[in-house]
Image (spheres, rainbow, N blue to C red):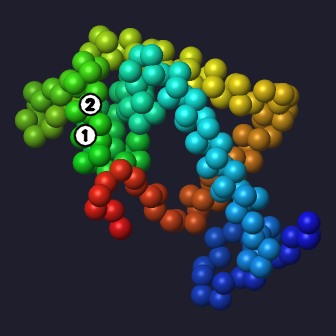
Amino acid sequence: MKQPTQAPAAPSAPTLAPPAIAFYEADRYLPEESMGYLMRRILTMVSSEVERQLEPIGLTNAQWLPLYKLSTGKASTVAELACESQVDAGAMTRLLDRLEAKGLCQRVRSLSDRRVVNIELTDAGRQAAAGIPAVLSQVQNTHLAGFSVEEFDTLMGFLRRIFNNAQASSVPPILTGGPHEA
């Protein structure tokens, strides 16, 4: 493998961080060796296993996240759930329709502001949400088999650094799930 070289600085771009090392070069780029490809493949495999394990309680991969966000108090309206789940409000509304049809949540109009509709878990929804952390923990621990505590801590540090770099690039998040996306 060729040694990484310093990437040329973009002439008109403001400098947010020190110049990056060019780990990838266009003339030698192999998608299957890219960071994004590997992260996407790992995420897909983890998501598939989570969905497989949640299938007995009737939850899909798309459905467990808003259910869990409701149970932890991270969101209580369609807009908040859409933001937390990184999907558009229309997609979240359709998803909540399915969760409501399964008896896991219900829409409740706010008493203080009739324009606001809160989403609340039913008893069945709270019970289903209570099992989600165990599934997530088991699946992720399986994928981390063979890692030492030190390796795990290092990996998490690297992932946080990549995440922070992505946030610093000020590229808005890509929302999925709607037919009218740019």
Q: Amino acid at mark 2?
A: Arg
Figure check: 131 above or below 52: above
Figure check: 170 above or below 50: below
When asked about the image quadrant of residue 108, the answer is top left
The residue under the point 35% across, 50% down is 177
When asked about the image quadrant of residue 156, the answer is top right
Q: Label 2 belongs to which residue?
A: 98
Image position, residue 29 (x, y; %): 75, 70
Q: Measure how far apart labels 2 and 1 are at the Cα level.
A: 7 Å
Q: Nearer the viewer, residue 61 or 161?
A: 61
Left/right of residue 114 with respect to residue 22 in the rendered view: left
Helix, strand, or loop for circle 2? Answer: helix
Figure check: 84 above or below 18: above
The residue under the point 10% across, 40% down is 115
Disc 2 crowd, CA 10 A, few/some/many (<14, 14-19, 20+): some
The residue under the point 7% across, 35% down is 114
Q: Are marks 2 and 1 in contact (CB under 8 Å)?
A: yes
Helix, strand, or loop for circle 1? Answer: helix
Left/right of residue 131 with respect to residue 21 in the rendered view: left
Figure check: 12 above or below 48: below
Image position, residue 45 (x, y; %): 62, 38
Q: Amino acid at mark 1?
A: Arg
Q: Nearer the viewer, residue 64 or 5?
A: 64
For the C terminus, the quadrant is bottom left
Q: Label 1 belongs to which residue?
A: 94
For the N terminus, the quadrant is bottom right
Left/right of residue 124 with respect to residue 171 in the rendered view: left
When asked about the image quadrant of residue 124, the answer is top left
